[in-house]
Image: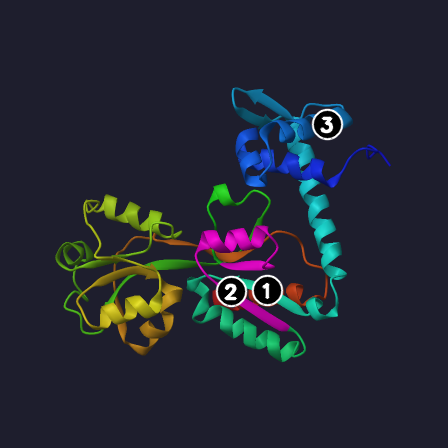
């Protein structure tokens, strides 16, 4: 083998941390080590490989072409090692799939697939965690969940992760049934009635802000900020508030007629929904089955 005798796991982890963070100092803070120690580890790796992996420009550490090529293989090697460790983690863990579920799929899409999964693999279990996008990304990176389902993460969150597209989902402007704004021009309605916006950290917030800016409404201030259905639903039912939210969050309420939508006529008010994961799953594992079922259900939805 051409693997240097002195190459250790810490060398790869240090290299990938710097590649992701962009600076030695930022990577050192993430790994909770000193900057000189991390710099030494990266230098050791470069010496063992006989090539420079980073171009140092000021404080920045920019991958060289060789570094970029090595990064892809280093990620694949760690993913393969993680998968191997998971296979040996014991029978009580092999049949458990840990899933992070964002609100956009929690109401209908994911539960319907989970029921199908249970019918096919009744001996296996799905552990479901919910929370903000950033929280679930951190859980995914640390190995505390196997995959995350929801809106596509931002580009800064994607290094070391893969996103598999399932379907596109629109952002809706919703109100309670019988709201006086239903059927009216949305710009006029937004200028008249109180507004609930997604939280600043929500993935859809940037798209909503873009829409408001395009409509000349960037000065609007919300009375509440949330993507939580139980909270927003109660607010909508007892007021004339309007709420920007992904259709998947309120799909059941729209189907039941308890909520209605205002037609924004803005095709760009949509985004990709899919599954995000850190490594490939072994064939015939519960995680692999769940991923396959998610893709199949998305294809069935698209064919309708």
Estimate the spatial distance between the alpha carbons at disc 2 and disc 1, rounded to whole Å.
8 Å
Above or below: residue 129 compared with residue 1: below
Residue 304 appears in the picture as rendered: no
Q: Residue at x 59, y 52 (%)?
A: 142
Q: Residues within 10 Å of mark 1 (few under 14, many from 20)?
A: many
Q: Earlier in the sequence, mark 2 or mark 1?
A: 1
Q: Position of residue 19 (x, y in %)?
A: 59, 34
Which part of the image, by quadrant, shows the N terminus? top right
The numbered mark at residue 98 is 1
Q: Residue at x 74, y 69 (%)?
A: 91
Q: Is residue 130 left or right of residue 119?
A: left
Q: For the magenta stretch, what is the residue range?
A: 125-149
Residue 51 appears in the picture as rendered: yes
Asked if disc 2 and disc 1 are in contact, CB closer than 8 Å, the reply is: yes
Q: Earlier in the sequence, mark 1 or mark 3?
A: 3
Comparing 270 with 222, the one in front is: 222
Residue labelled with disc 3: 44
The numbered mark at residue 129 is 2
Would you identify the image quadrant in which residue 125 lies? Answer: bottom right
Comparing 122 with 8, the one in front is: 8
Q: Residue at x 70, y 39 (%)?
A: 10
Above or below: residue 259 compared with residue 75: below
Would you identify the image quadrant in which residue 288 lies? Answer: bottom right
Q: Is residue 41 left or right of residue 147?
A: right
- The question of residue 171 being in magenta is answered with no
């Amino acid at each position: 083998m051409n693997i240097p005798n002195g190459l250790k796991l810490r060398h790869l982890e240090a290299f990938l941390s710097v590649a992701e963070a962009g600076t030695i100092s930022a990577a050192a803070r993430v790994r909770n080590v000193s900057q000189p120690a991390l710099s030494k580890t990266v230098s050791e790796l470069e010496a063992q490989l006989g090539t420079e992996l980073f171009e140092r420009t000021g404080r920045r550490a920019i991958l060289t072409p060789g570094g970029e090529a090595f990064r892809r293989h280093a990620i694949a090697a760690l993913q393969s090692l993680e998968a191997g460790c998971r296979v040996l983690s014991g029978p009580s863990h092999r049949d458990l799939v840990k899933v992070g579920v964002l609100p956009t799929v929690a109401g209908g899409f994911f539960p319907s697939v989970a029921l199908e999964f249970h019918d096919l693999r009744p001996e296996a279990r799905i552990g479901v965690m919910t929370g903000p996008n950033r929280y679930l990304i951190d859980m995914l990176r640390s190995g505390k969940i196997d995959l995350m389902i929801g809106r596509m993460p931002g580009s800064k969150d994607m290094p070391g992760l893969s996103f598999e597209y399932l379907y596109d989902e629109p952002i809706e402007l919703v109100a309670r049934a019988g709201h006086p704004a239903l059927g009216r021009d949305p710009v006029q309605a937004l200028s008249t009635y109180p507004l609930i916006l997604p939280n600043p950290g929500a993935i859809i917030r940037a798209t909503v802000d873009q829409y408001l800016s395009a409509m000349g409404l960037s000065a609007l201030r919300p009375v509440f900020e949330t993507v939580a259905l139980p909270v927003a639903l109660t607010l909508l039912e007892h007021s004339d508030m309007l709420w920007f939210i992904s259709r998947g969050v309120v799909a059941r309420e729209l189907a039941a007629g308890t909520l209605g939508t205002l037609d924004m006529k803005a095709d760009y008010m949509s985004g990709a929904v899919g599954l995000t994961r850190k490594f490939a799953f072994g064939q015939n594992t519960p995680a692999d089955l769940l991923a396959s079922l998610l893709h199949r259900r998305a294809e069935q939805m698209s064919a309708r």
